[in-house]
Image (cartoon, grey):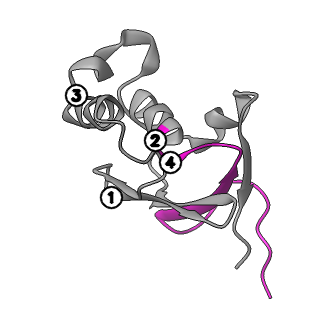
Amino acid sequence: MKVRNGFVSNSSSSSFVVTNQTVRAFAEQVVKLMYDDSSEGYINSKEWKALKTAECKKLNPNIPIRIATCNYDTYIYPFHNYLIVSTCNNYDWSVLIQLDTYQITSLKY
């Protein structure tokens, strides 16, 4: 069995597990990462508007979400007490580790 630690891969896809977050809360961080959080360009994105509309309608924050990202769409869905994230390797997902509320673990292959 091959065990991966971290986010380095020869593949253009990436999967990891997130704990202590709702799907919507993590999806908001993904959208901010996609649009360069510092520029606040995400505020006018269709993804951000969809997340905020779901929040306003008080929809379940753990409904699975698909976000269009580079190469592959990003899928975020709950599984027991975790979130499974299946995505592309075109973003530096490891920057989300810097947020204290996230514990991210690479999936073992």
Q: Where is residue 53 in the image (x, y as percent from the top left)?
A: 25, 32
With respect to residue 4, does 28 lie above or below?
above
Tell which circle, 2 or 3, labels the residue nearer the N-terminal end.
2
Circle 4: residue type: Val
The answer for how far apart the CA atoms under marks 2 and 1 are is 16 Å
The answer for how far apart the CA atoms under marks 1 and 4 are is 15 Å
With respect to residue 27, does 99 lie above or below?
above
Tell me the magenta residue range: 1-24
Of the two numbered discs 2 and 1 in the rendering, the one whose residue sits closer to the viewer: 2
Q: Assign the N terminus to one quadrant of the image.
A: bottom right
Circle 2: residue type: Arg
Tell which circle, 1 or 4, labels the residue nearer the N-terminal end.
4
Q: Where is residue 98 in the image (x, y as percent from the top left)?
A: 72, 28
Residue 100 badge: none
Inspect the magenta stretch and tell me whether residue 54 lies in it.
no
The answer for how far apart the CA atoms under marks 4 and 2 are is 4 Å
Verify CB contact (< 8 Å) between mark 4 and mark 2: yes
| Residue at horizontal 69 percent and vertical 68 percent from the top | 107
Of the two numbered discs 1 and 4 in the rendering, the one whose residue sits closer to the viewer: 4
Tag 2 residue: 24
Helix, strand or loop status at disc 3: loop
Tell which circle, 4 or 3, labels the residue nearer the N-terminal end.
4
Badge 1 density bin: few <14, some 14–19, many ≥20, Cα 10 Å: some
Tag 3 residue: 45
Tag 1 residue: 73
